Structures are given as structure tokens and as C-alpha cells.
Amino acid sequence: MSTTTVDDNAVADGHWHGSAHERKGFFTDTSICIGCKACEVACKEWNNNPQDGTFELLGSSYDNTGSLGANTWRHVAFVEQDGERIEAARESGRKLVNLGMPSIRPRTDESEAKPLDGALGAAESGSAGAGASGGGLPETPPMGIDLLAPGALEPSDPEDIANMDTTPPDTEDFRWLMSSDVCKHCTHAGCLDVCPTGALFRTEFDTVVVQNDVCNGCGTCVAGCPFGVIERRDDGTINTPTDRDDRKAADMDVPDKNTANKCTLCYDRLVDGQEPACAQTCPTESIKFGDHEDMVDKAHTRVADLHAKGMTEARLYGANPNDGVGGTGSVFLILDEPEVYGLPPDPRVPTKDLPQMYASAGMAALGMFAAAGLAFLGSKR
Amino acid sequence: MVEDVEFSSYYGRPIVKAPPWGDEIAIYLFLGGLAGGSSLLGLGAQFSDRPGLRIATRLTAITATAAGGAALVSDLGRPERFLNMMRVFKVSSPMSLGTWILSGFGVGSGVLTAIEVDRLTGQRLPLGPLRRVLHAMETPAALESALFATPLAAYTGALLGDTAVPTWNAAGRSGLSFVFVSSAAVAAGGAAMALAPVGETGPARLLALAGSAGDVIGMDQMKKGMHPAEVDPLEDGEPGRKLHRAEKLLIAGAVGTAAVEVGARVFAKKVAQGAGAGGVGTGGAGSSSRNWKTRAALRALSVVSGAALAAASAYTRFGVLEAGIESTKDPRHVVEPQRARLEDRRARGIVDDSITTGT
């Protein structure tokens, strides 16, 4: 992957140096997410998170959770798309690859016939006949790729495939995007930077965690997160609002009320050598957990595989250390533009702007002082 | 060149979250500015021998500081833990820096208040030998609080700017601090005009006029530096109405202030007579009823204009705070500017810094 220098303009990167642990993270491969929400449930169970909302139907496909928040640290998004949107996603993905990002090549190399990395390059040379598109990527084959078919994700062996029912359950004019979102555990974490009490801290696993016994609920971190992840737990209840007399509600307090809450990457499990609850429970290994470096490598390999299969809509989110947050600890493979999943297309840690804002505030302060001085000089009696 | 003109979102749901900041924070923004500006006027009044202005501004400063601090604490999720703010001094957190600025400001302001209260009560505070110590601290305390005064008025621009809230962040990058110090000057000048005698509030009027000009120009410049989708919340809906109201009050107050200033200079003698006799500004007995009427008219205009200016400042703070919160509700305010800057960088040949990558 890219080894270009990481932008160090952010005030604090908060890395542990000389830590005995590798940086940990997720790789959430949404192309094999089946939308079972086991991750949401496991997360709630393990972290004893209160209920969100009142179990109402949100009218957004099978997503009745809505979004990440104080009480929801894993959120599975459901997006239903028609043929037009699928084609648009393929097109935007193709453009992205052709941009050569993240680029360690000079931009002028783009148009040349220089092979792309790995499987992508292999795919290109394999589809020499269809090279008229000139883009470097093969055209989408006429038949949809069936990811759910047995063996579809294994290295293809022609003999095996011949005996299989290859009728794709997916159609060309409809698809379902399912994606399990989570805290990004950014390299430059906005929430951590702006926390005025030190309640948020960087763990030895390079994750970002709130100490709820220190947090005073000022809410600055909520505004500091470019992904809208962290939130103050102002409501939430363990009991359902439909509790009836015959079903005695458990007398239970909402834990950590009025303090900021978010995914801890199961810090309590990590220190015990366990993996996070969501990753452990994920039946398709859509959520992978491990050393951040391995996760990023896996992500790069996987996206190249999908491209080789013609799924040009596949792209990575958060795998670039040069992005506005210095890369995320939770890397995603997504199949459309990030905003389709409710992710910001160009997030930027606000702290990056802070030196300039302090400079401007300093100038303003001096200006005000000067104005007051002149006001007194101007009205001598 | 924005290629992806069609805006898509996840069921129109917000991408970033608004902080749980209510009216208390808007009130604090206003009071912090008012306190800072008042402290500067108090320092000047001390050195230029304007006792009425000095007392009014110092008492305004401490009242605003105490009320502002209380508003901040009450907006915390766990107010009983407000002292946790003092665990750290953290430059990357404007909230942390602001806490220390407010505390530093409060120390000097508190000492000055004790001095003024002691004076006003005819040295009835049970201070004993400490009275001399207290009064000896007047100038150091005035300088100390003045040192923190302008940072107190200015840092809130960075506080709102250093967020992922689209309108605040863009405003912070485009000079929100200039708008806020101007608004602080307007508030402090206005409050002093309303509370101190006309003969002594010349500097307050000039500061308020400078602040008014700075506010209008600063707001205009700020909006020019922002993406249209980030500006919209400042102009539409309830926050937009508040900011429009702020502008109207500001202009009306500034016109009134200018009129008072002209009047005070034209009738300088009559005004000076009143100030000399009246002290804190209860009107005082003039030598003739015509002088009294002139002074009363000027004072009334001063009070009304000052109140309008202070209200304008408050509306500005409420408007900006609420516009930011509004800007988190529609993902358009997040996606459009981010798409635009991403496309802009790509157009300039920078293709290695996107969070979304094809390989």
C-alpha cells in the first residue's frame, strides 16, 4: 500500500509509541454482509447498551435502528437500489480506480498502459479484447456476479463451476446494499482532540475510548466527530415503553447516563486477548478484526479481487493514510459512494483547521483590544 | 467542475451529529463577549477617570461571567463534574482553553468587583487590614482581566469552528472570531451606554460603532468564504430570521449611537454638567430645565440604542449557534461542500488524499 508521508498537520495524532500492542482495527467487507444484524445484537448485549427508540418501523428498508449513536455502536444500513443506481455505482467506482488513488504514481502515468497492481492488472490483461474502453478496467460482464453462491468467493476452478447451478439470485436491475457501520477509531480523532476533560483517550491498541467516570457530558466531542458517531446518552432505556403489568420491567438504571458514549472496539475484551463482540459473532466474516495493518492489506486484496470479477463498484473507505482523518482504524469495503451509506465523502478532522482558527482568533482579539484603545483615545474629554 | 450533481444520502438522515448545546450555550456566547468587552471598557475607564463607566462595566463583567459560567455548567450532562474541565490544559480543545480563559478572567474580574462593592458600600465589607491589600490590587487585577478579556471574546469562534458541524466549521475557517469579537464590542458598548451616564460613555459608543461595522463586514466576508450549502442555514429558517433581526437591531442601534455621540459632542457642556453632578448617572440636577431636558433625551436615546445593540449581539449568537445545529440536520450541508472540495482537489491534480480509494 501507499507509503507516502502521512500529513502531520493535525495537532494531535495520539499514537502510542513503543506500545507492546499493534494497532487494532476492523475491516468491514460490506460485499459479504447479509444484513443479519447479529453484530448490532452482540454489541448491545456485550456492552449493556440501552434500547434506542421505541421499536417503531423507520420505513427505510430493513433498517429500524437509524444510525450510530450513544446506544447503538454497530448499525447495519440497508439500501435498495435499481439498475440505474447500480450502473452509476459501477461507473463512479471505475472512475475512482482510473484516478489511481491513492496514487504513488505520478498522475501522468494514468493514461499509459502501465499495468495496475495485482489482480487488477491481471484482469486488465485478461480482457484485452474489451480494452476499447481504455480505462484499464474490464467492462462489467453481462451477468451479475453472484457473491452468495457457494464457492463464488473461492479461487475459481473451472471444473467445479461447471457442475454448479450458476443462476444468480441477484438481478441486474436490483441490489441490496447492507453495511455494518461502526466508530472509525481515526488516526486523527476529532472527538479525542476536542475533549476538554481528558475523558477520551487513546488506548494501547490505538483505539479511542471514553472514560465514562470522567466525562462530564459537555458534548464537544459530539460536534468534533466528522462521522457523527459519538453521542451523549441523554435518553435510552433498558425497558421497553410497552412494558405491561404482566411483564414486569426490570428495574435497571441506564448506565453512564448523560456522558458521551461510542464503540470502544470492545476495549474490555481486547485487554483479555478477545476479539470484539461484533466481529466474533459475524456469521459471514463481513466484520474482520485484527492488526490494523493486516486489515488494510486484506482490504486492498479484496477490492482488487472484486474488480477482477468485474465489480468495479467496489471501493475502500478509510484505507488511505493521507485522507482528512489520517486513515481510519475501521476500514470498509463499500459498493457505492460513501454518502449512499450515510458516510461523509470527504471527512476532515476539524482540529486540522484549528491552528489557523487560533491565529484568526488571536488577530481578532488584538483587533478588539486596539479598537477599545482607539475608542478611549478618540473620546478624550 | 462538480460531476456528481445528483445528491444522494442515506434516507436523508444526518451524517454528522449536532452537539447537545441548547440556549445556554448561545447565552454564554453572548455573555462571554459582553464580559470581555466590558472589562476592556472598565480598564479604560479606570485610566481615563470615568467612575460611572468604570463601575457599570465592572459590575456588568462579573455578572456576565458568573451567569455565563452558570449557563455553561448547567448545559453539561453531568454538571456536578464541571471541575473535570480543570483536570487538563489541552490546546487541541478550544473548550479546555476557554475554560481556563474564563477562569483567568473571572479571577481579576472578581477582585475588581470586590473593590467596587467595597467602595459603593462605603467600605463596609468586613475586610480589616486586608482592605489596603485589596485596593492595592486594583490595577494589577484590571490588567489581568483585560489580558483575558479579548481571548474570552474571540475563542468562541474557534470553539464553534473546531467542529464537524458544517456551518460552524466553514464559518470558523472564514473568520467567525472576527464576527464574535465585533459582536462582543457591540454588546459591551451597548450595555455601557444603557448603564452609564452619557457624558462618560463616549468610548463605549465608539467601541460599539466600530463593533457594528466589524460585525456587518465580518459576517459578509465570512459568508463569502463559505460554500453556499454552508451559508444557507445562516439565512433560512428560524436561525436566518434571528440573524436578520440582529442586523436590523444592529443598524438601528448604531444609528441611535451615532446620534447620541453627535448630541454628546454638540451639547458637551450640558452633558458634562450633568455627569459632574450626577455621578453614576441618576440624572442629577441641572442648572436649568433646558439642560436637564437635553440630557434626559440623550440618556433615553443612549439607553434605547444600547439595549438594541446588546439585543443585536444576543440575536447574532443565537442565530449562529442555531444555524450550525440546523446544518447538521440535512446531509446536503455536509455532502455538497465535501464533494465540491474533493472535486476541486481532483481538478487540481491532487488525487491521493481521498478517504474513498479504488485500490
Image: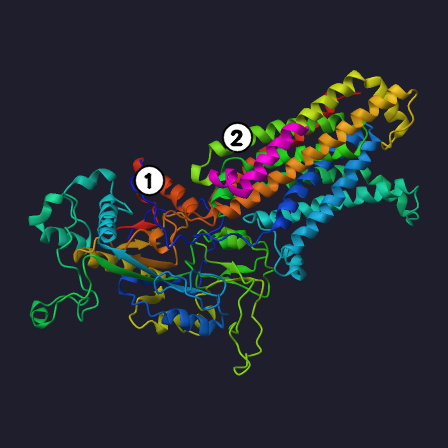
Q: Secondary structure at mark 2?
A: helix
**Span colored in magenta:** B231-253
Image location of residue A213, percent across then percent down: 59, 66
For the C terminus of chain A, which image quadrant?
top right
- Up the image or down, A203 lies above or below B279; here it is below
For the image shown, how many numbered marks are present on the structure? 2
Query: To which quarter of the image does residue A290 belong?
Result: bottom left
Q: Chain of mark 2?
A: B
- Up the image or down, A252 lies above or below A176; here it is below
- Which is more foreground, mark 2 or mark 1? 2
Q: Can you see residue A273?
A: yes
Left or right placement of residue B177 versus residue B198 in this view: left
CB contact under 8 Å: marks 2 and 1: no
Image location of residue A143, percent across then percent down: 13, 59
Q: Which dot marks residue A298?
A: none
- Up the image or down, B67 lies above or below B216; here it is below
Q: Secondary structure at mark 1?
A: helix
Principal secondary structure, stretch drawn in magenta:
helix
Quick one: B276 or B173, which is closer to the camera?
B276
Q: Residues within 10 Å of mark 2 (few under 14, many from 20)?
A: few
The residue that appears at 55% across and 53% down in the rendered structure is A220
Residue that numbered label 1 is attached to: B343
Residue that numbered label 2 is attached to: B220
Q: Amino acid at mark 2?
A: Asp
Image location of residue B27, percent across then percent down: 65, 46
The residue that appears at 26% across and 50% down in the rendered structure is B358
Q: Please report whichever mark, 2 or 1, sits nearer to the chain's N-terminal start.
A: 2
Q: Amino acid at mark 1?
A: Glu
Q: Are marks 2 and 1 on the same chain?
A: yes
The residue that appears at 46% across and 40% down in the rendered structure is B230
Quick one: B32 or A322, which is closer to the camera?
B32
